Image (spheres, rainbow, N blue to C red):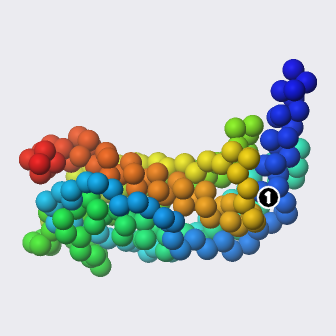
Amino acid sequence: MKKLAFILLSLFVSISLFFSCTKINNIEINEIGTYPTPLIKPLPLRVGVYYGNDFATFETTQTVKIPNIDLIYIDHVKMGKANTVLFDTILPMVFEKVTPIRYLPKESDHMRDVDLIVEPAVHSYSIPSPTADGVYIHIVYDINFYLPAGEQICSWQIEGTGHSLTQIEFKTEVTAITELTQMAMREVAANFMTDFCKQADIKKLFYKKCSQ
């Protein structure tokens, strides 16, 4: 029991080193880190991708409670550029042709050169209080899918988690937040690529193409 208590105490002390000051300002995340090229063949779909302003300029302020220590304020985690890099990386791996679009079509419009429109949005970004299991960063995206005429097909909520055991050392708090966020984004990428055709409405609409 004493050994277990010592281990837990050591973990919490190590966790606190991630956030050694009471406020961390202006963390800008512009990349998702190294991501291996998956061994998949792109689906024969032409996709238009729309990045809304909130998505492309996303930033957040977080409050983290460290056990037995004060609240830590992490101000202005800016990840809008990393958001667009994430989907600029994912989509060409999944689809045969990807075209950026500047607006979502209305019912009277029709984008004839695409089969599907994808609009990602950030649902939530959180840094939960550290636990004995380590430090976490959790990202949830809402992926909205539309037909070329503007009718929404479905919305898919997809999650990713960056997790660090306390044995992993980071040089600074900023490095820790950046790398754990990138880890969560890469998990989102993997989930999107493996599960796109498993979405019921997508599978129904593009059954033949998903089956190739």
Q: Would residue 168 appear left or right of 108 to someone viewing this image? A: right
* Residue type marked 1: Phe
Question: Who's the residue at 42% across and 71% down the image?
Answer: 84
Question: Residue 139 or 150: which is nearer the viewer?
Answer: 139
Look at the image and tell me in which quarter the N terminus lies: top right
Does residue 72 appear anywhere in the picture?
no
Question: Who's the residue at 61% across and 52% down the image?
Answer: 137
Q: Quadrant of residue 35?
A: bottom left
Q: What is the secondary structure assignment of the residue under circle 1? A: helix
Outermost bottom residue = 102
Query: Please, is residue 166 above or below residue 21 in the view?
Result: above
Question: Residue 189 or 166: which is nearer the viewer?
Answer: 166
Query: Please, is residue 26 above or below residue 125 in the view?
Result: below
The number of discs equals 1
Residue 39 percent coordinates (x, y):
29, 54
* Neighbourhood count class around disc 1 (C-alpha, 10 Å): few under 14, some 14–19, many 20 upward: many
Query: Please, is residue 102 above or below residue 98 in the view?
Result: below
Residue hosting label 1: 19
Residue 46 percent coordinates (x, y):
16, 66
